[in-house]
Amino acid sequence: MTGREGPRAPDPDDWWSSSSASAPRSAARSSRRPASDTSVTQPSGRVEPEDWLDEGGAESAGRFGMPADPRQRAAIVVVAALLLVVGLIASGVFAGGKRPTATTSTGPTTSVSTTPSTPAAAVPPPPTATLVPGASGSEVKVLQRALAALGFSVGAVDGSYGPATERALKRFQRTHGLGADGVLGAKTLAALTLALRP
């Protein structure tokens, strides 16, 4: 061992040395790519990343895997914002609280009537003359239809002023406070005409 040794070769494992011999290596390192905390200096002087999964990703990827180029970052942000707006429109957020209901028609449309399906019975006209039991003809049929329309059963509408028509007329007269004689006189005819008015 001599007291004075010649220039030493730089030790690649000596991270703390600040010798001037490591300056060219660090300059070469910075010219190629930025060194990360996990880089390893090879004996040939080349700096390589220690992580074998990182294949040049330190140059192309920035923080959180975003590209380092600001234009690429802006493009990604714009695309993400557009996708968000399209998703919100599709879900109906901007529809004002009401989602339109879809109606499908498989055939011809039919209108719904609000009136009853069976037409209301037409109110028959009252007889035009007075009648007595035993009479027959068209005026008796008019009387029988009128009594039936008011809810007083006369049996068959046959144009014969028989016992069934007489009984129905007596019930009508009692209901309206008239003398129940079964004869269609002037007072009974007036009451019948008034009852048939709509």
Image (cartoon, grey):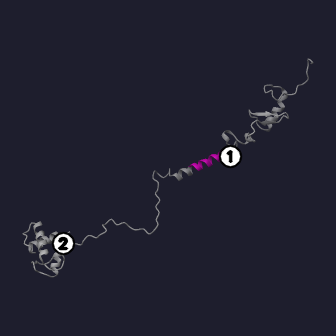
Q: Is mark 2 on a helix, strand or loop?
A: helix
The amino acid beneath tag 1 is Gln
Choose between 16 and 180: the one closer to the eye: 180
Q: What element carries label 1?
A: helix
Residue at left offset 10%, top offset 71%: 170
Residue at left offset 72%, top offset 42%: 60
On screen, residue 81 versus residue 101, left or right, reads right
Residue at left offset 55%, top offset 51%: 87
Mark 1 = which residue?
Answer: 72
Choose between 151 and 139: the one closer to the eye: 151
On screen, residue 43 versus residue 185, left or right, reads right
The amino acid beneath tag 2 is Ala
Percent position (x, y) of residue 23? 83, 30
Choose between 47 and 181: the one closer to the eye: 181
Instruction: State whether residue 94 is above or below residue 129.
Output: above
Point out the stretch of residues depicted in magenta. 72-84
Mark 2 = which residue?
Answer: 148
